[in-house]
Image (spheres, rainbow, N blue to C red):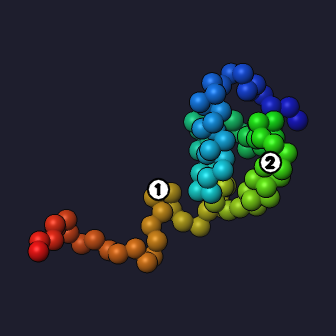
């Protein structure tokens, strides 16, 4: 399968951002497609061409089957992730000494 959008259509800055988003655990392939128009397979092919083989293999092993990289497999709501251990803020009060 060949990538439909050639990497020369993207600036160096855009390529860096695509690679950065692909490495981020919580950024879905859907978000990359929405922003840059690249489907998952196209991102994989771009990563294969832009990275050293060892770096690509490490990345591919990390994202293969990772639920957070696929919107349909996510088990939390879209939006900002909030840890259950995060302190609840009930009001916006500045503490005074």
Q: CA distance from mark 2 to mark 1?
A: 28 Å
Q: Nearer the viewer, mark 2 or mark 1?
A: 2
- For the point 71% across and 61% down, which residue is it? 66
Quarter of the image containing the C terminus? bottom left
Question: Residue 88 location in percent, x, y?
Answer: 32, 74
Residue 65 at least partly seen: yes
Above or below, 13 relative to 87: above
Query: Foreground residue, 13 or 45?
Result: 13
- Where disc 1 sits, the SS reads loop
Q: Quadrant of the N terminus?
A: top right
Number of other residues with Cα within 10 Å of mark 1, as a class: few under 14, some 14 to 19, many 20 or more: few
Q: Is residue 1 left or right of residue 85?
A: right
Q: Quadrant of residue 7?
A: top right
Check disc 1 and report the residue beneath it: 79
Identify which residue is drawn at 77% across, 41% down: 51
Residue shown at 63% from the left, 24% from the top: 11
Q: In this view of the protein, can residue 41 be seen by the observer?
A: no
Instruction: Give the residue number, with chain letter if any, for mark 2.
Output: 56
Lower sequence index among marks 2 and 1: 2
């Amino acid at each position: 399968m060949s990538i439909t959008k050639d990497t020369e259509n993207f600036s160096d800055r855009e390529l860096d951002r695509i690679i950065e988003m692909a490495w981020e655990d919580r950024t879905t392939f859907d978000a990359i497609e929405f922003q840059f128009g690249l489907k998952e397979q196209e991102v994989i092919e771009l990563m294969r061409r832009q990275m050293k083989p060892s770096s690509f293999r490490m990345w591919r092993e990390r994202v293969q089957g990772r639920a957070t990289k696929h919107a349909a497999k996510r088990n939390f709501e879209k939006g900002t992730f909030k840890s259950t251990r995060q302190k609840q803020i009930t009001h916006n009060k500045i503490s005074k000494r």
